[in-house]
Amino acid sequence: MKKTVLTFGLVSGAVSSLLMLATLPFLDRIGFDKGLIVGYTTIVLSFLLVFFGIRSYRENVGAGKITFGRAFSVGILITLISCVCYVVTWEIIYFKLAPGFADKYTNYMVEQVRASGGSQQLIEAKLKEMKDLKVMLDNPLINAAITFTEPFPIGLIVTLISAAILRTRSRPKKREEEVGELLRSA
């Protein structure tokens, strides 16, 4: 199981990391709204490897059979490895490649409140909220924890769906014997 999980987890993590790095230069052009859509789309694309990892395990290790529990285990381990790669990449981006990200995001969020006709009190409340968020994001451990919560729920959903689709149910022996008897008597 280790080889399958590591292979597909690292490939999934590499896909999400590379796509995140590839879209970074375009963030100013596409804006935060579209950036959010692009970001979650890349996360979903990277988690397609969970399905293929479970299928590979089923075919190569399980001889074509896998229980839901084993499929879930394989999928969630692939998801965790991919999420760790995602978090490490974001930490590098946030602290080294785009150190002004939090300030740009703060300006964007405050401008959203202002554009929607928010009162000065709402604008100041949003500004305080964003400053508090920046303080948290400037702590690498809190930043990592927050970042982990972005891809993990999607990976969990993909894992559950993939495990349900790819599981194989073993037929009870009694039913197989009954079918065999019917075929012999016919």
Image (cartoon, rainbow, N blue to C red):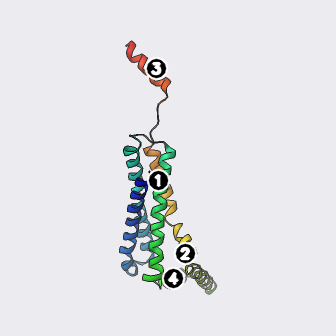
Assign the C terminus to one quadrant of the image: top left
Residue at the disc numbered 4: 102
The answer to which of marks 4 and 3 sits earlier in the sequence is 4
Callout 4: helix, strand or loop?
helix
Tags 4 and 3 touching, CB below 8 Å: no
Query: At numbered mark 2, what does the secondary structure look like: helix, strand or loop?
Result: helix
State the image coordinates of residue 135 (x, y, percent, origin top left): 59, 82
The numbered mark, 3 or 1, whose residue comes first in the sequence reads 1
Q: Amino acid at mark 3?
A: Glu
Indicate which label's residue lies in the foreground, 2 or 4. Answer: 2
Q: Which residue is mark 3?
A: 178
Few, some or many C-alpha atoms within 10 Å of disc 4 (few <14, some 14-19, many ≥20)? some
Along the line of sight, the residue nearer the viewer: 115 or 4: 4
Q: Which of disc 3 and disc 2 is earlier in sequence? A: 2
Q: Is residue 48 visible?
A: no
Residue identifier under label 2: 143
> Which amino acid does the dot numbered 2 rest on?
Asn
The residue tagged with tag 3: helix, strand or loop? helix
Please tell me which residue is depicted at 56% across the width and 70% down the height of the picture: 145
Disc 3 packing (10 Å; few <14; some 14–19; many ≥20): few
* CB contact under 8 Å: marks 2 and 4: no
Q: Is residue 128 left or right of residue 86?
A: right
The answer to which of marks 1 and 2 sits earlier in the sequence is: 1
Give the amino acid at mark 4. Answer: Ala
Question: Up-down: is 130 above or below 174?
Answer: below
User: Is residue 158 placed above or below 25 in the rendered structure?
Assistant: above
Q: Tell me whether circle 1 and circle 2 mark residues in contact (CB < 8 Å).
A: no
The percent coordinates of residue 56 (x first, y second) are: 37, 49
Position of residue 71 relative to residue 16, above or below, is above
Label 4 vs label 3, nearer the camera: 3
- In three-dimensional space, the C-alpha distance between marks 2 and 4, rounded to whole angstroms, equals 11 Å
Q: Which residue is mark 1?
A: 75
